[in-house]
């Protein structure tokens, strides 16, 4: 069996982000042993099909914001999905990472 791809490693972590919690692109990169490659996480999530069950919407940027995309409808959808899970945005449209940030029990995955 071939080793998992980079995207597979990213997806394996993202699928464990619990409902009502968020993680940053950089956090996911670190957990996948891809430190410094937060953009790779964004590319992987962007490659998902529109009808995926992967909780992509739980990944935000390090400022606690939803990252801007070409299609603003995607940003609105992400916010709506997070709010449905109880995630609260402040007046600057930011999420308080101290309150809603995911703190996995395990450390970074080792190859």
Image: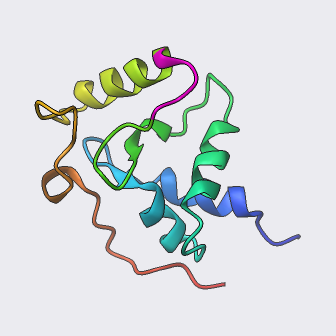
- The structure residue drawn at horizontal position 51% and vertical position 60%, both measured from the top left corner, is 13
Nearer the observer, 92 or 86: 92
> Residue 76: which quarter of the image?
top left
Q: Residue furthest bottom?
A: 110
Residue at the far top: name it: 73
Q: Is 44 inside the magenta-drawn segment?
A: no
Tell me which segment is drawn in magenta: 68-72
Display colour scheme: rainbow
Residue 53 picture quarter: top right
The image shows residue 89, relative to residue 10, as above or below, that is: above
**Is residue 5 placed above or below 41 in the rendered structure?**
below
Where residue 27 appears, x then y in whole percent?
Answer: 42, 65
Q: Is residue 95 left or right of residue 11?
A: left
Taking the view exactly as shown, the residue that stands out farthest to the right is 1
At 47% from the left edge and 56% from the top edge, which residue is drawn?
A: 25
Q: Quadrant of the N terminus?
A: bottom right
Tally of numbered tags? 0
Q: Quadrant of residue 98?
A: bottom left
The main secondary structure of the magenta stretch is loop
Residue 85 rendering spot, x and y as whole percentages: 25, 32
Q: Position of residue 14 (x, y in %)?
A: 50, 53
In the figure, 38 relative to 44: above or below? below
* On screen, residue 14 above or below 30: above
- Image quadrant in which the C terminus is located: bottom right
Is 75 left, or right, of 37 in this rendering?
Answer: left
Residue shown at the point (12%, 34%) measured from the top left: 90
């Amino acid at each position: 069996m071939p080793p998992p791809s980079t995207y597979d490693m990213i997806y394996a972590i993202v699928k464990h982000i619990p409902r009502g919690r968020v993680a940053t692109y950089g956090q996911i990169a670190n957990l996948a042993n891809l430190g410094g490659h937060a953009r790779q996480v964004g590319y992987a999530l962007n490659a998902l099909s529109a009808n995926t069950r992967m909780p992509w919407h739980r990944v935000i940027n390090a400022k606690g914001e939803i990252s801007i995309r070409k299609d603003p409808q995607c940003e609105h959808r992400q916010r709506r999905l997070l709010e449905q899970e109880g995630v609260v945005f402040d007046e600057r449209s930011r999420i308080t990472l101290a309150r809603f940030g995911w703190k996995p029990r395990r450390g970074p995955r080792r190859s």
